[in-house]
Image (cartoon, rainbow, N blue to C red):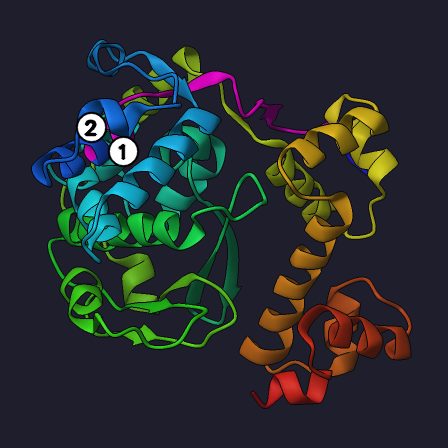
Amino acid sequence: MRRNLTHALIAPDARTIPGSPIAKAIMDVCRARQIDGHRLLRGTGVFENALQEAECISFSQLTKLIANAHKLCKGTDFSFQVGQALASSHYGGLLRGLEYCRDFNQVIRITSHFMHLVCPIVAFAIYRKDSQLVMIMRDPAGSYQNWVCKAEIVMSALYALSKRWTGSRLGLTFHFPFHRPRQMADYEMHLGRNLFFEQDSFSVRFDRSAVNARFEKYEPYVRHAVIGHYKKTYLRGVLLPEAIRLLLEQTPQISAADAAQLCGISVATLKRRLHELDVSFSQLVDAYRREQAVFLLKDCQMSNELSALKMAITDLANFRRAVKRWTGLTPAALRNR
């Protein structure tokens, strides 16, 4: 077991997220729809002039801003428009620095250390299947409030950025855990036509050509300078639920007591902070294990024996019962789904 967490813990109310670009993108989309700025910012503790001065805001403030905007905007394409704005009119900061990467493999390695800056509203679990890259989307706070809106913002931005960085349409597919929506035109306009519904989670999948597509502005010296600046300037860290997921990747059978110790807090503090985020340690563990089981059994079509081995479960009967509890399906039914 590792001695400590490799990422600093960030409190939801700590002002660690640069207010621009995502908050300003949300505000611009709302302003274009004639949404009153005072109503939009009500209850957030955010002031528009502070965003203009590039001050930092907290995850809680950003989440409240998204909730207000989603409630006030009447159109069905709000989330997609925000994603487009992030990739165009509010394209800057560390996000702009990523265009000097070689390919998406390099982007993923870098953003794994800077997710709280690059993409504060969504975290990713990265899985690889043969030559395919699977990015499963998670709520970094664990409670999944306004989750569809947040996931669609990031999907839209990612699709637009992939074209910007490579100069072409890549082999990306987008997966959604709900039925095919009525407003399919919005989805196809902002995400293309490779869309799959009634899936197990929100995810983005890259084929081999997309993973390895070389970026048009690849320049290692510029990239190194930009990343070096952010290493010195901003706190690199994660919210507690995502910290627990990272520890589960290292030690699948980790207990709450061990997780608290590695995070540098007491068990009571760990439980209290998770309760404040409306999630529990056991829920995080079950969600992580479900994610693993779906990928190994459904995506990779692995046998029960090999899947159990990968998940560090020694008893096959316990493995079958656990999969049934996590997914509602037996391993065989999940594999054939």
User: Measured from the top left, where is residue 158 in percent x and y?
Assistant: 27, 50
Can residue 220 be seen?
no
Left or right of 136? Residue 31 is: left
What's the mark number on residue 92? Answer: 2
Quadrant hosting residue 260 = top right
Checking the image for residue 95, the label placed there is 1
Of residue 320 and residue 224, the one placed in the foreground of this image is 320
- Judging depth in this view, the residue of 293 and 6 nearest the camera is 293
The boundaries of the magenta stretch are 4-25
Q: Are marks 1 and 2 in contact (CB under 8 Å)?
A: yes
Whether residue 97 is situated above or below residue 313 in the rendered picture: above
Assess whether residue 8 is covered by the magenta stretch: yes
Name which residue lies at 71% across and 41% down. Answer: 247
* Element carrying mark 1: helix
154 to 88, vertically: above or below: below
| Quarter of the rendering containing residue 274 | top right
How crowded pointer 2 is (Cα within 10 Å; few <14, some 14-19, many 20+) is rated as some
In the displayed structure image, the side of residue 294 where residue 147 appears, left or right: left
Position of residue 294 measured from the top left corner of the image (x, y, whole percent): 61, 72
Answer with left or right where residue 47 lies relative to residue 303: left
Q: Quadrant of the C terminus?
A: bottom right
Residue beneath the point at 77% across and 50% down? 282
Residue under the image location 21 percent in, 27 percent down: 24
Q: Nearer the viewer, residue 312 or 37?
A: 37
Q: Nearer the viewer, residue 238 or 296?
A: 238
Amino acid type, mark 1: Leu
